Amino acid sequence: MPRRTIVQLLPALHSGGVERSTLEIAAALVAAGHRSIVISAGGRLVPLLEREGSEHIALPVGVKSLRIVATASRLRRTLAELKPDLVHVRSRLPAWCLRLALRGLESPPPVVSTVHGLNSPGRYSGIMTRAERIICVSQTVRAHVLRHWPATDPDRLRVIERGIDPSQFPRGHQASEAWLRRLHGEHPELRGGRLLLLPGRGTRLKGHADAVRLLAALRAAGEDARLWLLGADEPGRRPYLAEIERLAWQLGVRSALAISAPRDDVREAYAAADLVLQLSGKPEAFGRTVLEALSVGRPVLGWDHGGVGELLQALYPAGAVPLHDMDGLTAAARRLLAAPAPMPVTIPQTLAAMQAATLRVHDELLAD
């Protein structure tokens, strides 16, 4: 296969699922012998990207400003110099900037887009459907695209689920006694009993209030349950967290609740948990935490909608509960705590599978 030049376009390289996927595909392109270039405003992940063999070009393609025309002109000149075989765009404003840049460009390259989220309906988000191939990160996203942009040709859509590296979340992984002692020293509320874990940002969408209500219902039923809201304690979230704490006080479970900042040792957290929760009230495009927890071998309980419901129905249906059915959630939690349903034998949504499928979309488009 000839060596290709592939450009990926996104707002910045700080953190998040879009950024992680960009680095994962960049690494796969380098491993396949291609020239991998990422264009963004930069960020803390640039050194890692470059260490793994890709190049980075700094352009503010994701900045909302009247200067987007000037940025598009700079992008046009950059693409004319690079002569990429293909451009892969991952966000809406960069997609608009790219569309402006391709006007007047001699021999414009084909474009692949990835729709990472359930974008708001309308013309602005519809730019992601203007590519020659459109990757959707779940069947949920595919249905969303076709529902809100019905003129989209379904033949241009490809569903490629996000994937995890099973070696990073090995089945049966155990948290060490030393790690558990440190955890209980930091959060004595979690010592003893059955540990419920809800990993997620400090936003109302993640369903922290439902998790607290579940904790109260379980303790009222005689379960010595404890709840850890991992990742909820973020800068600027104090008013929201105070609201969650007030609810816990009102329900009499504040002493069994721990709220912490994001941590790098989430694998140990999964391993220590008796039950992992995914209770987003708004449908998610995907549900990476579902995969990570199941890969380690921990039961997962979540609302049966969006990408989370899609994964639970495919991999762990015992953990899928109709949205907002708190009685059903409590009953399912008690069943899974008493006797967890068998884990899936394999997790097909692997990083390697996602990388290979994405490169096949590139190959398919370039072969047309």
Image: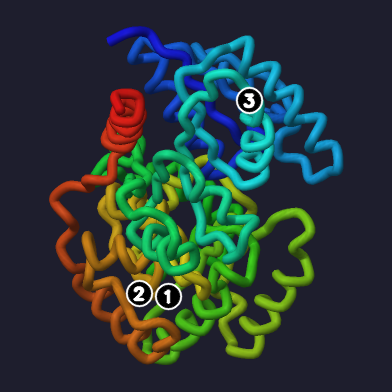
In this view, the residue in front, 75 or 338, is: 75
Q: CA distance from mark 1 to mark 3?
A: 47 Å
Q: Is residue 83 left or right of residue 158?
A: right
Tell me which residue sits at (65%, 90%) in the image.
250
Badge 1 or badge 2: first in the primary sequence: 1
Of the residues shown, which amino acid type is indicated by label 1? Ala
Category of crowding for the residue at label 3, using alpha-carbon neighbours closer than 10 angstroms: few (below 14), some (14–19), many (at least 20)? many
Residue, disc 1: 225
Which residue appears at 59% of the width and 31% of the height?
Answer: 9
The numbered mark at residue 304 is 2
Label 2, residues with CA under 10 Å away: few <14, some 14-19, many ≥20: many
Q: Which badge, 2 or 3, comes first in the chain's sequence?
A: 3
Residue 14 visible at all: no
The x, y position of residue 122, in whole percent, is 61, 64
Q: Quarter of the image for the C terminus: give it.
A: top left
Helix, strand or loop status at disc 3: strand
The mark lying in front, picked from 2 and 3, is: 3
- Residue at disc 1, secondary structure: strand
Q: Which residue is mark 3?
A: 39
Alpha carbon of mark 1 to alpha carbon of mark 2: how far? 23 Å
- Which image quadrant is residue 236 in? bottom right
Mark 2 and mark 3: Cα distance apart in space: 37 Å
User: Would you say the residues marked 1 and 3 are in contact, meaning their CB atoms lie under 8 Å apart?
Assistant: no
Q: Residue at x 71, y 22 (%)?
A: 58
The residue type indicated by label 3 comes to Ile
- Could you classify mark 1 by the number of other residues whose Cα lies within 10 Å: few (under 14), some (14-19), or many (20 or more)? many
- State the image coordinates of residue 119 (x, y, percent, origin top left): 56, 60
Earlier-in-chain disc, 1 versus 3: 3
